[in-house]
Amino acid sequence: MLLKLATAFALVMLVPAGLHAQQPVTPVTVQGTVFDSLSRVPLANALVQFVHESGAPGFASALTGADGKFALKLEPGKWIAGFSHPLVDSLMIELPVRRVDVGVSSNPRVALAIPSSRTLLLAFCGKQQDDSAGVLQGYVRRAPEESRLDSGGVYVQWMEMQIGRTGIERDLPTLRARVNPDGSYRVCGVPANTEAAVWAQRGAASTGLVSAMIPKSGISRLDLTLDPQATQEIKFLRDSGAVADSTPLLPGEKLRPAPKVGAARFSGVVGDAKGKPLETARARIVGRRPAKANGAGVFVLDSLALGTQTLEVRALGFVPVSRLVNVTDAAAPDTIRMTSIKAMLDTIRVIGERVYNADVNGFEMRRRGGMGRYISREDINRRQPYEFTNLLYGVLGMRVSFWAGHVSVFTRGVVGTCTPAIFLDGFQQILDYESDLNFLVQPDEIESVEIYTSGPSTPAQFTGRGGTGCGSIVVWTRQRPMEFKAPGKPSRTESVCYLVQM
């Protein structure tokens, strides 16, 4: 009996000790912030994670708020802290982790951050000669299976304007980086805060020319997709001026490659902000001829190479659209919504008399004067140009230059090389590039072209705004067959025009 009581007493005395050993440890609140040193703002929606330094199971995590702050509870001990965010993935970096010692009574604060642009650039490229130089990096994938390419090159080209003795001169610096076996590339030395033309090549295959903006931070990422089988080129004319290409090339590669022929098709539907179809729209892949949208706003582009391309869509009275697309075998039709510029411009109402004669715009009269260069419909039929700007090659006093999928035209003006004014059916067009006319008018729609390469030879009505003395290019479209309601009596027409200023 005494033995049983003693045993029971011993068990009772042991219970509090056992319960004390199993009691949970009081957690400690850990607070902190995550900062984006590139943009110098707190980083929202970053996933912060803590794991035991000893490797014991269990972890804790929290998302940062709009102010970059987070808070979570941890058991006392030694922890390792880190965070993830899509911005970190885009930088192609692995952030260092931090050791955090969580005491029983302390409430530690933890500061985590993406390194500064200077730190990252030094890690990526080492010491660069120019403090304002940046880096473009990313991966190159193979179409159509999207596996990473194991070789090739990526080119980055940008424009620099310099004022010399002969006027304004243009230079096209070009950098090249090899594609690594893991498909990654890194181009160092690209100027920050600059828009550049980028393309990837492997032998005779290449992506389309695409645009990349290098931000003020100097760090940008661009992934590209290339079809190694698309090697057949669409021929087009090169710059009419000499360009020195000193960048080393791999066998079969060349600077500013021609667009490639493929079996892919890309389609889309163009509409205004409310979805109403725009049947006047034209769409193209940079370097290819544009396609007209039908009455439902649908366009189809055929014989394209798979991979990364630049799609451009334009319509009179709407803000142009330009964006990167990935051409695939089973791509669904794209949807493009265009913004009208009516709200930004005043409306001009033009009342005119339609006159029916052989020289409605005065082209023949000016050609007889011989002050410029004149291209008639017969000349166009004989030359069979690929697009409008091909007509400008070989014109004395004019240089046609290709860059980033666009064509620029320069003449020798009063103060050096400059850009001529562009007129379409008597109205001046304010365009980013002369090649934008390729969207608005096709060779089979042109009746005649007048080219004036200097100010003194330009008729007064075609001097353009500002009167810079750079000459003008005047395009006249073909007249459609006209119906007479009353024979011998000219019809009175009224139309609304919007002066487009970009």
Image: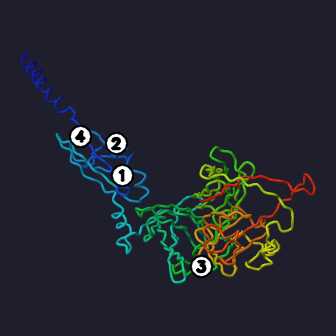
- The percent coordinates of residue 116 (x first, y second) are 34, 60
Above or below — where is 83 with respect to 116?
above
- How far, Cα to Cα, is label 4 from label 2? 15 Å
User: In this orientation, which residue lies closer to the viewer: 415 or 241?
Assistant: 415
- How far, Cα to Cα, is label 1 from label 2? 19 Å
Query: On the rendered structure, is 139 left or right of 305?
Result: left
- How far, Cα to Cα, is label 3 from label 1? 49 Å
Identify the mark nearer the N-term, 3 or 4. 4
Q: Tags 4 and 1 in contact by the CB under 8 Å rule?
A: no
Q: Which residue is mark 4?
A: 75
User: Residue 418 appears in which quarter of the rendering?
Assistant: bottom right
Q: Amino acid at mark 3?
A: Val
Q: Amino acid at mark 2?
A: Ala
User: In this orientation, which residue lies closer to the viewer: 39 or 140?
Assistant: 39
Q: Quadrant of the C terminus?
A: bottom right
User: In this orientation, which residue lies closer to the viewer: 35 or 193?
Assistant: 193
Q: Which residue is mark 1?
A: 41
- How far, Cα to Cα, is label 3 from label 4? 78 Å
- How far, Cα to Cα, is label 3 from label 2? 65 Å
Which residue corresponds to the image point at 23% horizontal and 40% vertical from the top-left?
A: 75
Identify the mark nearer the N-term, 3 or 2. 2
Q: Nearer the viewer, mark 4 or mark 1?
A: 1
Q: Nearer the viewer, mark 1 or mark 2?
A: 1
Q: Tags 1 and 2 in contact by the CB under 8 Å rule?
A: no
- What SS does tag 3 mark? loop
- What SS does tag 4 mark? loop
Q: Which residue is mark 2?
A: 62
- The percent coordinates of residue 257 (x first, y second) are 60, 72
Q: Which residue is mark 3?
A: 414
